[in-house]
Amino acid sequence: MIAGLMGNVFMRESSKILFNVNGVIYEVFMSLNALSALKDDSDTLLITQIVREDGITLYGFLEKGEKDLFDNLIKINGIGARIAIAICSSFSPSDFFSLINSNDFVTLKKVPGIGEKMAKRIIVELSGKLENIANISLPQPKIEALAALESLGFKNTEIMKILENITNTDTQSIIKEALQKLKKI
């Protein structure tokens, strides 16, 4: 299995790139978010490789959170790679996590290819499974603060809302400020 590629962009298209790795060019499908953040010079991609009877397809990601989101989505019955990439193009991992926690199937069904029934199924199947995905998009001090606050008994969703507005950069200061705000809830 291919888990990652290091190289540079040979050619860009609307939903994929041709990625040059030491003279071997791979076709890699990516979300719009990842495509816009991808540098043309040297870069590293995390890869999900899907092997089917009719071919092998590579899906590339710049962040582990987006890759984990994609991998969780394609495990759901009825969700293929095309819809999973469309979801990754529409939402960041932390935004998708918030959407799942608030049971917002109305926003989810705005993604092309997703109807109300499928949106509700995605929410049901992924509820409680995506906490690590949302945490990955946070800076390390906030991840450490989140773990400390969860160990004190606060809910992940409450902590995440508060951490969004905290500007401190060291773990201790983040915890102190978050505790003050959590006491007010």
Image (cartoon, helix red, strand yellow):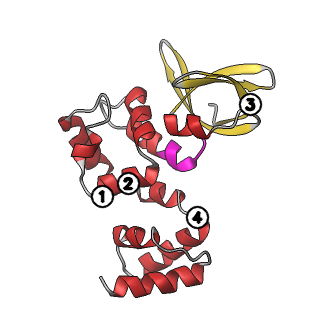
Residue underneath mark 3: 8
Question: Which element carries disc 3, helix, strand or loop?
Answer: strand
Going from N to C along the chain, the mark reached first, 3 or 2, is 3
Please give left or right for residue 106 compared with residue 74 in the image: left
Disc 1 vs disc 3: Cβ atoms closer than 8 Å? Answer: no
Quadrant in which residue 84 is drawn:
top left
The amino acid beneath tag 2 is Phe
Q: Where is residue 108, by image quadrant?
A: top left
Residue 65 in picture, x, y percent from top left: 52, 50
Q: Horizontal and vertical percent for residue 104?
A: 24, 50
Look at mark 4 in the image and give the residue it sits on: 139
Q: Closer to the camera: disc 1 or disc 3? A: 3
Of labels 1 and 3, earlier in sequence is 3
Image point (30%, 30%), residue name: 78
Q: Can the viewer see residue 127 in this picture?
A: no
Under mark 3, the amino acid is Asn
Q: What kind of element bears circle 1?
A: helix
Establish if 141 lies above or below 71. Answer: below
Q: Main secondary structure of the magenta part?
A: helix
- Residue 115 is inside the magenta segment: no
Q: In this view, does 17 lie above or below 67?
A: above
Check whether the beta carbons of the residues at disc 1 and disc 4 lie within 8 A of each other: no
Q: Which mark is residue 101?
A: 1
Mark 3 burial class by Cα count in 10 Å: few <14, some 14-19, many 20+: many
